[in-house]
Image (tube, rainbow, N blue to C red):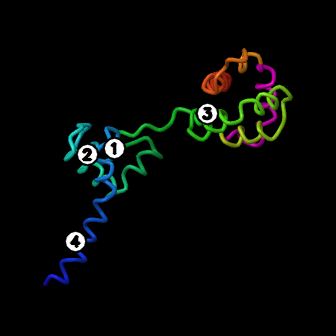
Amino acid sequence: MKKHFIPWLLTAALLLAGPAAMAGQENYGCGLGTMIFGNTHTLLSQVAAASTNQTFGSQYFGMSSGTSECKSPESLVYSPRVKVFVAENMDSLALDIARGQGLYLEALAALIEVPAENRGEFYSLLQANFSSIYPDEQVTSDDVISHIAALMS
């Protein structure tokens, strides 16, 4: 009897390891578990919500569709990948925007999913508005991203 119990115990431990690791966080996600157990911050409710999300995969669907109390990003311009790219390439990106062409500008357009047929127009827009994107030497990467997002809206 003990031999049959050990595999079940190990399986249960593995299934609960992911949600249990997230239990100390306040932001354990969105999805079906969040809808059922609410946004309380008790250990039990967080483990139950995270387990439900993991079991049904509703968090993945909710993040991509904006359902199940998940919020989809308002704009690709504010995605984490764009933030990291702009922060790490501020000077090179500034040079490319000033010229209206270049690899860094092309990479930015690809990251924010500007359609290939609209990229020339995108490059010209940024070049024409260079002084508002990079108003001074103290501009931050977040400022640059906000200025680009404002131009695109």
Give the label, 4 or 2, closer to the camera.
Answer: 4
**Does the CB distance between marks 1 and 2 fall below 8 Å?**
yes
Magenta residues? 113-130
**Does the CB distance between marks 4 and 3 fall below 8 Å?**
no
Q: Nearer the viewer, residue 7 or 74?
A: 7
| Residue identifier under label 3 | 77
| Residue identifier under label 2 | 46
User: Residue at the spot x=71%, y=38% of the render?
Assistant: 108
Give the label, 4 or 3, closer to the camera.
Answer: 4
Give the label, 1 or 4, closer to the camera.
Answer: 4
Query: How far is disc 4 from disc 2 in space, using C-alphas?
Result: 22 Å
Location of residue 114 with respect to 139 vertically, above or below? below
Query: How far is disc 1 from disc 3 in space, using C-alphas?
Result: 24 Å
**Does the CB distance between marks 1 and 3 fall below 8 Å?**
no
Label 1 residue SS: loop
Place of residue 149 in the rendered image (x, y in percent of width and height, measured from the top left): 63, 26
| Residue identifier under label 1 | 28
Magenta stretch contains residue 121: yes
- Which tag, 1 or 4, sits closer to the chain's start? 4
Query: How far is disc 3 from disc 2 in space, using C-alphas?
Result: 31 Å
